[in-house]
Amino acid sequence: MSRFLSRALAGLKPYVPGEQPQDKKYIKLNTNESPYPPAKGVAEATYGQAEKLNLYSDPDCLLIKRAAAAVCGLGTGNVSVGNGSDEVLAHIFRAFLQDTGVAFPDVTYGFYPVLCSLLGIKYKTVPLRGDFSIDVSDYEGIDSAVCIANPNAQTGVYLAPEKVEELVLQNRGRLVIVDEAYIDFGGSSAVPLVKKYDNLIVVQTMSKSRSLAGARVGFAFASKQLISDIEAVRCSFNPYNVNRMSMYAAAMSLEQDEYFRSCVDKIVFARVYTATKLGKMGFEVLPSRANFLLARHSGVGGEELYEKLKERGILVRHFGDERIKDFVRVSVGTRAQMDEFLNAVQKILEERDAEG
Ligand SMILES: *Cc1c(COP(=O)(O)O)cnc(C)c1O
């Protein structure tokens, strides 16, 4: 820490993203990326724009606003676009949460508390139930804003849209943010509810189901009034926040519905397959509607399993948080990758049995 760092930031603990190691080739099942390449035409669209990089990108992001709005039946005035949904979340937190504070589950996306400490926002955590589900009645009486990920980060556990609506209706004077980074892998989106409720913001990303993690494109969907506030923050910070190449890559991707669906179907199939196999090996696997599984085994700790898989060239994610420290989180890759992962897990368990 230098002696110049702002005092308010002295205790800042930045978000720790999953490893992106450059030393050797791993089977990467640690950051919930898609194992499939971006849709056809995305690369060409990107190169095409690379030749125009002398020009700024469109500060209104109209190309993707139109495409995204069309996909979910809203108008361009109901959409804000960011450099990844992480940035969209930052705009939202900055715009709305300073006065009210925010509540979110004790096990969820680790970026929420980090953003709060960066922006000086008060937050409190609400424990998930014993089965790692969100019980919306636990939010009754909370008058700060509420932020949930659905399906939830780290667990994959899903909350039905009726329950999301209940959360929104509990207190119409309270803002509810629903982060749907994983919604395409088997959930039903709350986006249609933004037409009905002016205290709901839904956040989505192209990083997971659209195979564009490296492009950094995310969205907020909400009423025109909320979006205009988010846009005011965005344009006060970086009006050219989405670069020209990513904008065209995203727009091209949003047109390719069939490819998108086929990738999602394959991932969902591999998820169900992997969960079944892990169950047969004695793992407890949380019911996931995302592109990852959170699983634990009574015979091997989460950290140990993570280390032993890494030695075998397979990266998964381990979190030290008390409630999930026995688990590993495994992103769902191709069926072939999942078979390699399952074989490695089998061998690790056998070795342990032999030792034990
Ligand atoms: C991955 C993830 C994000 C961030 O996505 P980007 O669009 O890549 O910034 C946001 N929220 C949750 C819950 C995530 O898992």
Image: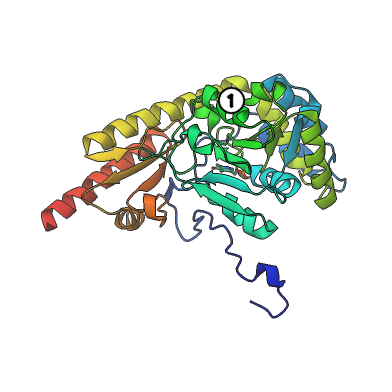
Q: Amino acid at mark 1?
A: Glu
* Residue that sits furthest to the right in the current view: 55
* Residue that sits furthest to the front in the current view: 141
Residue 191, position as x, y percentages in the image: 64, 25
Q: Which image quadrant: the N terminus?
A: bottom right
Residue 106 vs residue 5, the one in the foreground: 106
Residue at 55% in and 32% down: 209
Residue 333, position as x, y percentages in the image: 43, 37
Residue at 70% in and 72% down: 7
Q: Does residue 105 appear anywhere in the picture?
A: yes
Q: Residues within 10 Å of mark 1 (few under 14, many from 20)?
A: some
In this rendering, the answer to whether 142 lies above or below 225 is: below
* Residue that sits furthest to the bottom in the current view: 3
**Quadrant in the rendering for residue 303:** bottom left
Residue 148 vs residue 18, the one in the foreground: 148
Residue 9, position as x, y percentages in the image: 67, 68
**Quadrant in the rendering for residue 301:** bottom left
Q: Which image quadrant: the C terminus?
A: bottom left
Is ligand 1 closer than 8 angstroms to the Cβ of mark 1? Answer: no
Residue that badge 1 annotates: 165
